[in-house]
Amino acid sequence: MPLRKQWHDLDRRTVGRVPDRPGVYELGDADGTVRQIGTGILRDELKTALAYGDGERVRWTATQTRAQAEELAAEHRDRLE
């Protein structure tokens, strides 16, 4: 099940708007196909993804804890395998 969020271009402007909180994110290509699911402090993770060119688009959900983010990400990873 994908995150039910709108895709955003993975650029500096988007990364600046991302909350500095734990969460789960999906990186996708230009067509919106999910290529990677990750967790962590969202702003830090997406800065890294932007620097390495890991995707063209991104969507995310903030969580209260890293454990919640890991749980949610595990559900999403099952769908990609």
Image: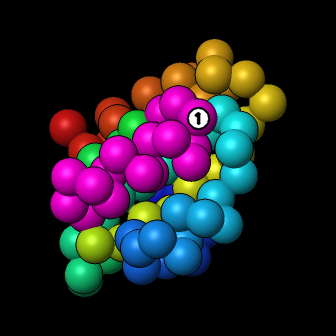
Is 41 placed left or right of 28 in the picture? right
- 81 is higher (above) or lower (below) than 4: above
Kind of residue sitting beneath label 1: Ile
Q: Nearer the viewer, residue 3 or 65?
A: 65
Q: Quadrant of residue 37?
A: top left
Q: Position of residue 63 (x, y in %)?
A: 73, 37
| Residue positioned 24% across, 81% down in the render | 30
Q: Position of residue 74 (x, y in %)?
A: 44, 28
Tell me the residue that label 1 is attached to: 41
- 60 is higher (above) or lower (below) than 29: above
Q: Position of residue 58 (x, y in %)?
A: 43, 65
Asked whether the viewer can see residue 34, the reply is no
Q: How is the image coloured?
A: rainbow
| Residue positioned 28% across, 55% down in the render | 51
Local SS, label 1: strand
Which residues make up the magenta segment? 39-55
> Is 54 covered by the magenta stretch?
yes
- 57 is higher (above) or lower (below) than 70: below
> Is 45 covered by the magenta stretch?
yes
Magenta-highlighted stretch: main secondary structure?
helix
Is 57 placed left or right of 39 in the picture? left
Residue most extreme to the top? 67
| Residue positioned 20% across, 38% down in the render | 81
| Residue positioned 54% across, 76% down in the render | 13
